[in-house]
């Protein structure tokens, strides 16, 4: 179920480093090098597959940009916040 903009904004207050724009939530992470960035992306990929929810993302050298939205719901849903939390937990461990 698609969340309202107010619900998304409220949820983002407890989701540090993420912002809402263009009907998605977005963040980016900078790592020490490409290997660390790619390692984090690999771990995120396993979590995304387990949740059956996949990010739109890009990687340039040591920076990973991530956008989350639920395409079949037409916007941000609880799935996006669950994956955002999982991503934050993975990156914190790196």
Image (tube, rainbow, N blue to C red):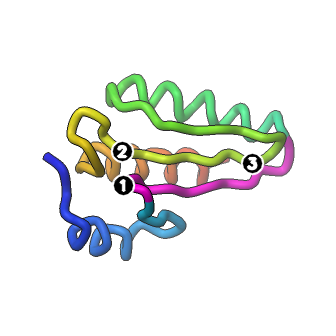
Q: Position of residue 80 (x, y in %)?
A: 34, 47
At mark 1, the secondary structure is: loop
- Between the C-alphas of marks 2 and 3, the distance is 20 Å
* Residue 65 relative to residue 18: left or right: right
Residue at image position (43%, 57%) is 22
Which stretch is magenta?
22-33
Residue 78 lies, with reference to residue 58, above or below; the image says below
Residue 31 lies, with reference to residue 58, above or below; the image says below
Report which residue position mark 1 lands on. Answer: 23
Q: Position of residue 74 (x, y in %)?
A: 25, 43
**Badge 2: how crowded within 10 Å, few (<14), some, or many (20+)?**
many
Report which residue position mark 2 lands on. Answer: 69
At mark 3, the secondary structure is: strand
N-term-proximal mark, 1 vs 2:
1
Residue at image position (25%, 67%) is 5
Residue 92 figure quarter: bottom right
Residue that lies at the very extreme toward the left in this rendered image: 1
**Badge 1: how crowded within 10 Å, few (<14), some, or many (20+)?**
some
Which is in the foreground here, disc 1 or disc 3? 1
Residue at image position (77%, 50%) is 31
- Between the C-alphas of marks 1 and 2, the distance is 7 Å
Which is in the foreground here, disc 2 or disc 3? 2
Residue 63's disc number = 3
Q: Are marks 2 and 3 in contact (CB under 8 Å)?
A: no
**Badge 3: how crowded within 10 Å, few (<14), some, or many (20+)?**
some
Residue at image position (49%, 25%) is 46
- Between the C-alphas of marks 1 and 3, the distance is 22 Å
Q: How many labels were placed on the picture?
A: 3
Q: Are marks 1 and 3 in contact (CB under 8 Å)?
A: no
Q: Is residue 29 magenta?
A: yes
N-term-proximal mark, 2 vs 3:
3
* Residue 35 relative to residue 45: left or right: right
């Amino acid at each position: 179920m698609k969340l309202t903009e107010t619900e998304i904004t409220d949820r983002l207050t407890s989701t540090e480093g993420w912002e809402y724009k263009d009907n998605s939530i977005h963040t980016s992470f900078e790592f020490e090098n490409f290997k660390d960035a790619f390692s984090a992306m690999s771990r995120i990929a396993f979590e995304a597959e387990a949740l059956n929810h996949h990010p739109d993302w890009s990687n340039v050298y040591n920076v990973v940009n991530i956008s989350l939205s639920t395409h079949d719901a037409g916007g941000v849903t609880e799935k996006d916040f669950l994956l955002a939390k999982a991503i934050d937990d993975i990156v914190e461990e790196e």
